[in-house]
Structure formats: structure tokens, C-alpha cells
Amino acid sequence: MKTINEQIKDFLNGLNSPVEIIDYIDIDQIDENDPFNSIYEMIEDNGGFDIEIIYYDDAINYLKENDPSLLDSLELASDYGFAIKDLNSEVLASLLASQKTRDAFYELNDEINRFFENIK
């Protein structure tokens, strides 16, 4: 019979997540009353959502496919307080890729909370 921590680890490893959750969290620190948000915050605090796109060609291609108007990536840059002089395609692509990763993880909210409700 598996321990609760082993069950949690197996569940988290089995999720279709954009990040390797288990690499960024401490299972013992998961708030049983708010599991999704506590997991999300641990991943955020440990840089798990940070995607870095470092080559100009890769950045341009990513933006061309995901934000050809640059509206989303420029809005993100503004939200994070970037000055125009600090922006380039790599920064914009990295900001957008990181946000898309956060958004994709957020879609697991109900599934994670449901699991923790059932494991109590």
C-alpha cells in the first residue's frame, strides 16, 4: 500500500502538465485546503514557469506563430514593467512562452483540487 505522499507524487507525475511539477515543489508543503494554488505558488517561486527563448530566429518564429501582432507579448512586458529599450524578440517570446505555460498549468486546477478532495 502506497503512502499518501507516494500517491500524490504518482498523481502529479501522471498529469499532462507543461512543467515537471515534482521538480519544483515540496509535497509536504502542499496546503490541503488550497492544493492547486499552493502548488502553483511553489512552481512560480522556484522558476518552474520561466521559459527562456534565447536565439533570435527561435524567438521570431515563436512570436510569428503565437503572437504575430505582438499585442499579447507587449502587454505582458508592460505588466512586468519593462521599458521599451529593454525589449527584443527574445524577451517578448520568453514572456509569452512563460505566460502560456502558466495558463496551460492553470487548466489543471479542477483536476488537482478534485484529487486532493478525494485523498483526504
Image (cartoon, rainbow, N blue to C red):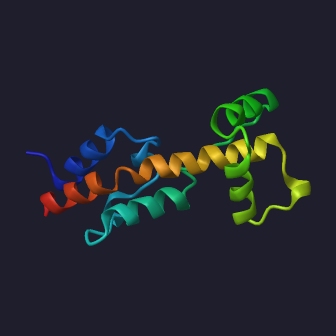
Query: Furthest residue to the right?
Result: 85
Q: Answer with left or right where residue 107 lies relative to residue 11.
A: right
Which residue sits at x=53%, y=59%? 44
Residue 64 visible in this rendered orientation of the protein:
yes
Which residue sits at x=51%, y=52%? 102
Report the quarter where the N terminus lies.
top left
- Most foreground residue, 100 or 70: 70
Which residue sits at x=77%, y=47%? 91
Residue 75 spot, x, y in % from top left: 71, 58
Mark count: 0
Q: Answer with left or right where residue 23 lies relative to residue 74.
A: left
Which residue sits at x=74%, y=57%? 77
Residue 50 visible in this rendered orientation of the protein:
no
Q: Answer with left or right where residue 38 lies relative to residue 33.
A: right
Residue 106 image-quadrant placement: bottom left
Residue 52 spot, x, y in % from top left: 68, 42
Is residue 58 shown above or below 49?
above
- Most foreground residue, 5 or 42: 42
Q: Answer with left or right where residue 18 lies relative to residue 8.
A: right
Residue 84 spot, x, y in % from top left: 88, 57
Residue 67 image-quadrant placement: top right
Query: Furthest residue to the front?
Result: 69
Query: Furthest residue to the bottom?
Result: 33
Report the quarter where the C terminus lies.
bottom left
Residue 73 spot, x, y in % from top left: 70, 50
